[in-house]
Amino acid sequence: MPFKRALLASLFLLVAPGLADAAEATLNGADTAWIMASTALVLFMTLPGLALFYGGLVRTRNVLSVHMQCFAIGGIASIIWFASGYSMAFSEGSSFLGGLSRAMLAGIGEDTVSGTIPESLFVLFQMTFAVITPALIIGAFAERMRFAAVLLFSAIWLITVYVPVTHWVWGGGWLQQLGVLDFAGGIVVHITAGVAALVAALVIGPRKGFLTTPMPPHNLTMAVTGAGMLWVGWFGFNGGSALASDGNAAMAMLVTHLAAATGAVTWLAFEWIRFGKPTALGTITGMVAGLGTITPASGFVGPAAAVLIGFAAGAICFNAVQIVKQKLKIDDSLDVFPVHGVGGMLGTLLVGVFASTDLGLFSGQGFADGIESIAHQFGVQLLAVVVVTAYTALVTFGVLKAVDAMVGLRVSPEAETEGLDIVSHEERGYDL
């Protein structure tokens, strides 16, 4: 017996350090693998998804300019995120803005953990969001902004709008403290990009011939291909925002798909009724509207609510496009505000209702901690929509005016007629 006890004691001493390390470690291999895949999917949304989607929607002489802008923004946004963006968004600071303790990603190594994944992976995942958000805005001023102005505007806007709002909502800022619900970026991505797009369209003015010359997409096949990539990539956008490989991620993916499908069918139905024929352009636009609208709600609502949200997205965003283009005569070239801005606002408000656990078939996962009623949660969501809309509009206007003073916003009328592919890059999308 003494020998056995001594042997067991020796074995325990050998394995105890390993057991202690395992207990202390929080890294989860399944979570890490899923967020790595999600990160690739979100980058895939911009490059090549958004580039092809937007590129197909502009005219032949401007297709490469759109592709170039998406790629260049991808590079610039990534560098800014590395230098200071991540730190100001997610490190400790004030309720308005984080600090610089993680500037240049200081202190982040292979063993640094954020939740159950490497912090380096969390940085990269969030970086892909920082890439796609300013890239969305270029749809508003496509075919008429100087390339230097696009880059300068995107860089300054990312620091002055995207980073602070990210901190407010996800980085421990004042909106997160109030209990705002934004699972994957309805506020952070879609409201900021949509509102900025509307302001940009107003400041830079319409394209030549906007109300008198037809401006159909030059390559709908390209646009549909890009839209399909966006649909697939959005599984990483929303599902990855669970930051874990679990039931929450799976449900987020399911409701994302249902909302996208319902938004697409709703939009084509509205077109069919109003114009006599459904279009490919309308169908993919409805899909994007459904995706943008479910984004803030995707981790908080159930499947039945997702179908209602998708229907609301298709119906409301369809009419928003008609109002912006036909009634207000605003040349938001690729409908960024009525699709992403309106969709983001709609989804942000609806999650305040459908997150409730008391709606039977339409119940969700529950409100934020400390919030017990639809009225309270809806009020927080409404406050976020109003404040972020106002802040984004004011700062975006200031940034545009500053960029105009520095390098000029708009190309000359002659350059606009010739096309930005040749004028800005000395290249053509097609050698005909």
Image: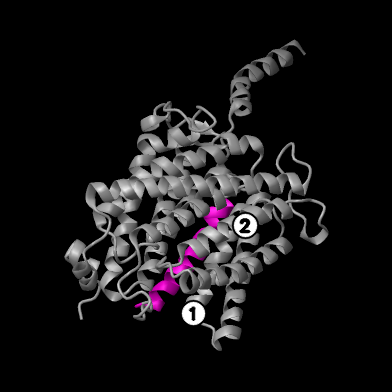
**Is the residue 103 above or below the residue 238 in the image?**
above
**Is the residue 165 above or below the residue 45 in the image?**
above
Amino acid carrying label 1: it is Ala
**Is the residue 163 above or below the residue 15 in the image?**
below
Q: Nearer the viewer, mark 1 or mark 2?
A: 2
Tell me the residue that label 1 is attached to.
280
Amino acid carrying label 2: it is Gly
Query: What residue lies at 61% left-to-right and 58% top-to-bottom?
Result: 346
Tell me the residue that label 2 is attached to.
347
**Quadrant position of residue 116:** top right
The answer, for residue 232, to whether it is visible in the render is no
| Quadrant location of the N terminus in the rendered image | top right
Query: What residue lies at 34% left-to-right and 64% top-to-bottom?
Result: 142
Q: Position of residue 212 (x, y in %)?
A: 35, 80
On the picture, is 3 further left or further right than 112? right
On the picture, is 372 further left or further right than 69? right
Q: Position of residue 348 (x, y in %)?
A: 62, 53
Prevailing SS of the magenta stretch: helix
Residue 43 badge: none
Q: Outermost residue, front direction?
A: 328
On the picture, is 79 further left or further right than 20? left
Task: Answer few, some or many: residues within 10 Å of disc 2's Cα (few below 14, many 20 plus, some between 14 and 19).
Answer: many
